[in-house]
Amino acid sequence: MSTNKKIKFSNKRTWSHDLPISFLMQQGVENPGVLSLAAGLVDQKSLPAGLTKQAFDHLFADPRTAKEALQYGTTAGSLALRTLLLKHLSRLEQKSAEALGITVDNMIVTTGSQQYLSLLGEVLLDPGDICLVAAPTYFVFLGVLQGLGARIVSVETDEFGMRMDSLEATLAMLDSQGQLSRVKMIYLVSDYENPSGVSLALDRRKQVVEIARSWSREQRIFVLEDLAYRELCYDGPVVPSIRSFDTTGETVILTQTFSKSFSPGLRVGFGVAPDEVCAAIRDKKGNDDFGSTNFSQHILATALRENLYYDHVEYLRTVYREKRDCMLQAADLHFSNIPNVHWVHPRGGLYVWMTLPDGIETGFNSPLFQKAIHEDKVMYVPGELCYAVDTGRGEKEQPSIQKNHMRLTFGVQNLAGIQEGMQRLANAVKSFV
Ligand SMILES: Cc1ncc(COP(=O)(O)O)c(C=O)c1O
């Protein structure tokens, strides 16, 4: 029988909100025929169904390994997988694990890198603690930070990623306000940032470690390096990670995922952190799920061990390079005659960041978004979602959240869909210029 009493949620409950991505997905469902340049899904056609079956067959050919995969695992993740991840990292860094100062004990396997980001936030941030982020940055992580009641402070960026002079100036400003002791981390998507496609320049990778160290006065300020897109590199130099400049391994926490380079359905990610942070994350994860899906970990370990993985990544790069080029060519064709429209040419990742003339807003309620979705039947991610609101400042003191950008992805559509989508989008934009 219903007692009809009010539900008294925790304070924390009110800090988490429905993700904008759910709204976008709903729009897609409610408006059939809409071509989505918004969806963050990966390319459907190249998903490794055959390779995963091969890995599965290999694993299940022996009842002993099959049963191991079907059993519970450990909180930190399969030791066999972590050993392979260590090799994987040294291959990417072109440095031995010893030179990197990383052992399997520094690694925790998580349910995607999203879980690692979230667990790390939980163990480091109290309400009011500060995380510095690039403007713009990965909006789902902004949601995680808000959900923890953290204060998010944005740092300016340019075509080489987060500006180190702005980072120093922001830390100095927080220091002058007596807030330095609340700063816990600097979050950076260093390769092919979601949403901007920009990579952090090599010299800045070294500088950010030095800056974090020099401002770590009362407490340690970590650099959280999110390398979700690291392996989706199409051209240009592959730059060493920020972590590789952390000679003592005390400052940088790194997280990576196999969602983009293999399969998001397996949802395997991992993170590398100093011992004390690892212990804290293990304790929290122990309470949450005492280990991510063991089955996925065994499949991935088999794919890595049996050399099924690296050829696939090579193939993926050719698939996405073609799609990236297709989107950039379509942008040239349809947008270059629209004045004051610019876009980033990403060297990797899944996104093209487009800037419209000042005054043309792209948000959900803007005339452009409404026309695009209802008349032109095309969808994008409004750029303003990727800028943080700083809860430490009043409404009028907010650093300006830019409203004239769009995040376009070439991940999910095929070539014809990308061309058609870009033409439709240009049509929508032209009516407002
Ligand atoms: C920058 C960034 N970090 C982390 C993630 C999380 O991915 P997953 O949890 O699937 O590993 C994503 C997903 O889109 C992302 O774009």
Image (tube, rainbow, N blue to C red):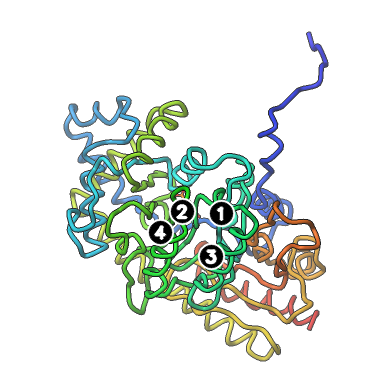
The answer to whether residue 206 is above or below residue 304 is below
Amino acid carrying label 3: it is Gln
Q: Nearer the viewer, mark 4 or mark 3?
A: 4
Mark 2, ligand 1, within 8 Å: the answer is: no
Residue 241, image x, y percentages: 34, 64
Considering the numbered disc 2 on the image, is that residue within a helix, a strand or a loop? loop
Dot 2 crowding, Cα within 10 Å, few <14, some 14–19, many 20+ = few
Dot 4 crowding, Cα within 10 Å, few <14, some 14–19, many 20+ = some
Q: Do residues under tags 4 and 2 come within 8 Å of each other at their CB atoms?
A: no
231 with respect to 190 (left or right): left
Task: Using the numbered discs, state the Cα–Cα distance from disc 4 to disc 3 in whole angstroms.
Answer: 43 Å
Task: Using the numbered discs, state the Cα–Cα distance from disc 2 to disc 1 in whole angstroms.
Answer: 8 Å
Tag 1 residue: 180
Q: State which quadrant residue 170 falls in.
A: bottom right
Q: Earlier in the sequence, mark 3 or mark 2?
A: 2
Considering the numbered disc 4 on the image, is that residue within a helix, a strand or a loop? helix
Comparing 341 with 217, the one in front is: 217
Residue at position x 23%, y 30% in the image: 66
Q: Earlier in the sequence, mark 4 or mark 3?
A: 4
Comparing 208 with 290, the one in front is: 208
Q: Which mark is residue 213?
A: 4
Residue at position x 33%, y 71% in the image: 239
Q: Which mark is residue 108?
A: none
Q: State which quadrant residue 332 falls in.
A: bottom right
Tag 3 residue: 413
Residue that protrudes farthest toward the top in the picture: 1
Q: Do residues under tags 2 and 1 come within 8 Å of each other at their CB atoms?
A: yes
Amino acid carrying label 4: it is Arg
Task: Using the numbered discs, state the Cα–Cα distance from disc 3 to disc 1 in whole angstroms.
Answer: 45 Å
- The quarter in which the N terminus is drawn is top right
58 with respect to 251 (left or right): left
